Amino acid sequence: MGLLKQEGTKTRYSYDELREFKDLILKKLKKAKEDLLFYKNSLSHRDGNGTDDTSPVHKDLSGDGGSESLSKEETTKIVLRLEKYIKNLNDSLVRIENGSYGICRETGLLIPKERLRAVPHATLSVESKN
């Protein structure tokens, strides 16, 4: 996959650059899946490390179940965010394969490498996002 040029401006990342982004995405994907498993296990208490009976921070002293629910609600929100993040990372891998990775979906211009290194699933440049 060679570089395509349009009026002296690079319109796609090179094969080597895409490989760098793919490696970064795969590392982030692995970590996100590990985190997701951890939080899902904590929701279902399958990990055996529950602290419901020992931690005063999470005990519901009012008797209405509110503090335990809040903790579960927060964990559920984290799980949902991680699932969305994993989907976005997987979508990025598809864009790498089809050659559209790193191209702003609004302007059609390349998203700067610095942004993609920070947010590898980005589909908009900072300017377009703002």
Image (cartoon, rainbow, N blue to C red):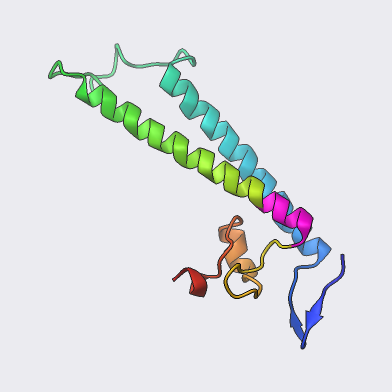
Residue sitting at the far right: 1
Q: Pinpoint residue 34: horizontal percent, then vertical percent.
A: 58, 32
What residue do we see at 60% from left, 55% from top?
A: 121
Marker count (numbered): 0
What residue do we see at 59% from left, 39% from top?
A: 31
Chain part drawn in magenta: 92-99
Q: Quadrant of residue 108?
A: bottom right
Which of the two residues, 16 or 98, is positioned nearer the viewer here? 98
Tell me the quarter of the image containing the N terminus: bottom right
**Is any atom of residue 24 visible in this view?**
no
Which of the two residues, 121 or 17, is positioned nearer the viewer here? 121
Q: Quadrant of residue 87?
A: top right
**Is any atom of residue 53 visible in this view?**
yes
Q: In which quarter of the image is residue 85?
A: top right
Tell me the quarter of the image containing the C terminus: bottom left
Residue sitting at the far bottom: 7
From the viewer's perspective, is residue 56 above or below residue 117? above
Which of the two residues, 8 or 115, is positioned nearer the viewer here? 8
Name the dominant secondary structure of the magenta segment. Answer: helix
What residue do we see at 81% from left, 62% from top?
A: 16
Horizontal side of 127 relative to 58 (left or right) equals right
From the viewer's perspective, is residue 115 above or below residue 64? below
Horizontal side of 99 relative to 63 (left or right) equals right
Q: Pinpoint residue 98: horizontal percent, then vertical percent.
A: 77, 57
User: In the image, is residue 98 part of the stretch drawn in magenta?
Assistant: yes
Q: Pinpoint residue 12: horizontal percent, then vertical percent.
A: 75, 70
Residue sitting at the far left: 62
Horizontal side of 115 relative to 6 (left or right) equals left
What residue do we see at 42% from left, 22% from top?
A: 43
From the viewer's perspective, is residue 41 above or below residue 102? above
Q: Pinpoint residue 88: horizontal percent, then vertical percent.
A: 58, 49
From the viewer's perspective, is residue 123 above or below residue 43? below
